[in-house]
Image (tube, coloured by chain):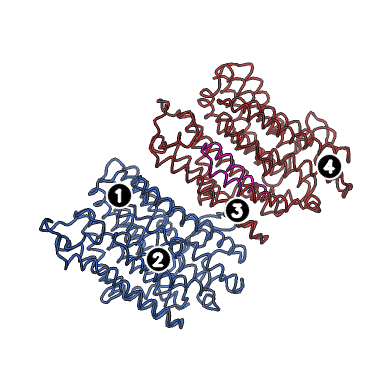
Amino acid sequence: MSLLWLPFLPLAGALLVVMAGRLPNLREALSLVTAAVLAALTFSWYPAVTAGETPTVVLFDFLGSAQLAFSLEPLGLLFASVASGLWFVTTLYAAGYMRGNNEAHQTRFFTCFAIAICGAMGVALADNLLTLFLFYELLTLSTYPLVTHKGNAAARRGGRIYLGILLGTSIGLLLPAIVLTWVLTGTMRFEPGGILDGQVSQGMATLLYLMFAFGVGKAALMPFHKWLPAAMVAPTPVSALLHAVAVVKAGVFSILKITVYIFGLDFAAQGDITRPVMWVAAFTLIAASLIALTRDNLKERLAYSTVSQLAYITLGAALATSMSVMGGAMHILMHAFGKITLFFCAGAIYTAAHKTLVSELDGLGRAMPFTFGAFLIASLSIIGLPPLGGSWSKWYLMLGALDAEQAIMMAVFMISSLLNIAYLLPIPARAFLFKPPAGSPIGLREAPLASVVPLCLTATGCFCLFFLPGPLMALLSPWNDS
Amino acid sequence: MTAQLPALQILLPMLASALCVLLRSPAGAWLCFTLATWASFAVSVLLVLATRSGAILSYEMGGWEPPFGIELRIDALNAFVLLIVSGMAAVMAPFARSSVLAEIEQTRVYLFYALVLLCLTGLLGISITGDAFNLFVFLEISSLSSYAIIAMGPNRRALLAAFQYLIMGTVGGTFILIGIGLMYMLTGTLNMADLAERLPAMADSRTEKAALGFIVVGASIKLALFPLHAWLPNAYAYAPSLVSALLAATATKVAAYVLIRFIYTVFLPERAFDGLMLSELMMALAAIAMIAGSVVAIFQHNVKLLLAWSSIAQIGYIVLGAALVTTAGLAATTLHLLNHAVAKGCLFLALGVIVWKTGGARLSDLAGLGRTLPWVGAAFVIGALSLIGVPFTGGFITKWYLLVAVAEQELWLLAGAVVLSSLLSIIYMGRVIETLYFRAPSQGTTRSEPVPVLMLTSVWLLALLNVAIGSYSEPFAAIARTAAGQLLGGTP
């Protein structure tokens, strides 16, 4: 099968969804089938990429000699697998959620969802900076109608911040950085070992790295993180998509890819090229965790948790050792499973009990044991405790910090893990241990099955990932050797 | 037949204009207008095909040999501008049917079409002629007819706007005439190619510098380059919808062509940019235009005015590329002539549909229309995205080429200005889009009948063209590169 199916199958799915707009059951079925086929197609590339191949497809010359081209390398396959695999789960969940809450404009919702996945796949497979930028923007624009789905004043405000920051950073910093790279080196291809080495001075490289890191606003480095909490006005499946699957992961993935294939780890580690970004990421990591502690709105707390977890990955990139980058890449996967579970839980709680504040959750665990059980597992995975997937990525990130001889960054990772415990664990603790407020009904009151099944699936995923580092290492090692 | 194409390019709209007056019926005039623009468009396509590889067509008007007779001379740049002008008119013809009937008095409709065709004749003539004085004549034809059609706008303020434009436009035209006169005095010829050959012998004469100065200022007025832009906002805002769209898409493009043609072909870049600091001056004015135009646009409540101010900013991009004196810069400028025409044309037409429906173009008239007129709203959004320069729209293509051209010269401040201007355009277009989709529809009187299919056809042709160019721009980029190469290679 051609590589082109990966970015363009979701687009075909979007078309099918539009055509089936009047038949909700068929529409959701089509979404699910497209997602399943896409995930299967993506996984089918695993053997080839693990064997060290880099399948490439050139579409056409897009801007002069700059091509629209796709290629699949290990990092990209990892991100593509996460995006396509979790798209399936999210669609299942969204079908239950949107119907359970009687949301309007469901066809538009599922269409934009599919286009957003197209954007994410394009980012994952981009063979050069230009292609990456094109699909990066497609992702931004296609998620705007999702963020403003409710169409009220709050949605408009959230959407304004969302679009303002993401378009602003990408046009204001990312595009100039790409142009600069093109003018200085005459190429935009992602190549093993990077393309900047020997072409630019250290000062220019440092500036470029800053422009890339801030220009990729989706990675939510402070001070460009505000769009994430602002986007919380969206329906919960969208939050799950934004935070766990497509948008933020496209951001940190871009940073990893740019670090590895544009700068090259050897070049990036020289001098102080990545040092400023490293400190910004470390600051974001801690500061966002502290802010999360103070938030009572469940989704908002999770949003700040995401900002902090993204900074882990950016920090992994900025440490620029093969261990830290591997840790960062793994964290894309591990955090995706953990965070999507948390958001699914938040949505399930909203659907079943109409509660949005952490302080309202006392004793709710007895009514919703599955939901809060999953919440507990996902929290532990994000904190990084074995036997859950999140422990691997944190382990490699810390090894990377040691490799780079950055003891302070080790400390940052540890402090942040403690903060994770402080802002995540009280939520299931309240739900299971506190007494429910007087007069609340007794007995099971879980959300509809279409919501509960996906969150149990992803929570199980967090657990299974702990036992799967082997295939992951096999995937990431060919690139790691070079 | 093909040998006569250059003459047909001007004659078709000119004769059709006269025919409109004879036909008198609104429907007949519209049909005549449509057929003439389509035929004229077909001619331009053939001319582009004939010149895109770098060939130059020369046509002796009336069989009189240049430099004594009038020569029509077509290279890649001319043909491209002709394509933009006639293409825009052809695409807008279906839109004109209902829009003009709604905005122009029934008894004057045929005159209106006759004048629009005359204006097109002028614009096409300016773009095709190889004779400096002939250029001035066509310039006056297009100017005089455009004063009249702006004055036919539905609001009485159109009269004042047209008068403002008349004063400024006449000053601009006169400046160009003085410049041409000075050159004639020096060399005794009016043929552009001939002028280019003879002027170097007069190098360093003050008369030549004065001629250049007069022509640059005159063309800049026509182009509405900051600070000579004062006539443009009102002229666009109070003109009939079709005229706003057509002038925004073509008139400033042709003025930019005049500026480029005189500087690069007649005076030759190595002398034009030597000594007068012309390049620096144009860059500075372009940068101010890009930023000031965008900032003012943010504060507009009338969407037509907003788009007009955005045009002033976009003219900055066009002039900036031309001021760089590099192939990359000129190619970016040439491409932006097309991309801005397509984007602004799309926006003005979508707005024209809204004016047809609600009777106004203030922001409050647009409230909630994204939901009640989904197709119009979506087209407006596509045009807006192109103006901002989002990938997969034409605007991104030019923004990319322009940024690369500026970065190649290491002019970081200018690169910053280009980026800043795009960011500002997010704000002003964002305001309109939010109004379209998030405000509750106002209770004003609106037409009950559905939007005519012909209107939507025009709007969507342009919207799709934006996306098509944004997805695959190579054919146009290749022409732009050829044109830039010819301009810098000396006389065409």
Which residue in the structure is indicated by mark 3?
Answer: B418
Residue B20 is tagged as: none
Secondary structure, mark 3, is helix
- Binning the other alpha carbons within 10 Å of mark 3 as few (below 14), some (14 to 19) or many (20 upward) gives many
Q: Chain of mark 4?
A: B
- Which of the pair A217/B300 is nearer the observer? B300
Q: Which lettered chain is shown in blue?
A: A
B71 lies above or below B405: above
As drawn, B235 above or below A206? above
Q: Say whether marks 2 and 1 touch (CB < 8 Å).
A: no
Note the chain letter of the red one.
Answer: B
Residue occupied by mark 4: B195
Spatial CA distance of label 4 from label 3 is 35 Å
Q: Amino acid at mark 4?
A: Leu
Report how far apart the C-alphas of labels 1 and 3 lie in the structure: 43 Å
Q: Amino acid at mark 3?
A: Val
* Chain letter behind tag 3: B
Which quadrant of the view contains residue A249? bottom left
Tell me the number on the disc at residue A30. Answer: 1
**Same-subunit check for callouts 3 and 2:** no
Q: Position of residue A216 (x, y in %)?
A: 47, 62
Q: What kind of element bears circle 1?
A: helix
